[in-house]
Image (cartoon, grey):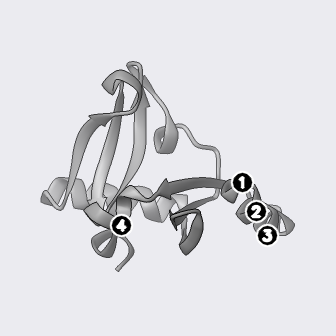
Amino acid sequence: FFEESVANILVASGDKVEVKTEIDKHKSTGNVVVEIESRGKPSGLATTEADWWCFVLSYKGEIEQVVILPVEELKSRLRRLTLSGEAKIIKGGDNNTSKLICVKKEVLFG
């Protein structure tokens, strides 16, 4: 639902937008995650053809924040933050079969 709502707003530009929703957990952890691999194959940010990456942060069914970044800028930030240790590569998803970059919201968006 959230993904479609935001994508419809942005589709008029003609750019491709990847919309990902962080539901509730970000509120207690302060983190967002970005998938880069699933089941041993590149996925998510590593394979997106989108021009923009949109984070929808929701809590208790309500949108609290929307952050939109150019994909190349997001990749650059995450690369830098991972190298500096401010972001970590973790396992997650179904049966821990995905690799995710986990980073504090204020570090990534700030």
Q: Quadrant of the C terminus?
A: bottom left
Is 57 situated above or below 47?
A: below
Residue 7: image location, x then y, percent:
74, 60
Disc 2 + disc 3, Cβ < 8 Å: yes
What residue is pinned by disc 4? 27
- Say what amino acid the circle numbered 2 marks: Ser
| Label 4 – label 3 distance at C-alpha | 25 Å
Indicate left or right for 42 with 19 as reference. left
Q: Are marks 3 and 1 in contact (CB under 8 Å)?
A: no
- Whether the residues at callouts 2 and 1 have beta carbons within 8 Å, the answer is yes
Judged from the image, the secondary structure of the residue bearing numbered disc 2 is helix
Give SS at disc 1: loop
Question: Amino acid under label 4?
Answer: Lys
From mark 2 to mark 1, how far is it between C-alphas?
Answer: 6 Å
Q: Please tell me how crowded label 2 is: few (under 14), some (14-19), or many (20+) other residues with Cα within 10 Å.
A: few
Which circle marks residue 1 in the picture?
Answer: 1
Distance between the Cα atoms at labels 3 and 1?
13 Å
Disc 3 marks which residue? 9
What distance separates the C-alpha of mark 4 from that of mark 1?
20 Å
Q: Amino acid at mark 3?
A: Ile
User: Which comes before the other along the chain, label 4 or label 3?
Assistant: 3
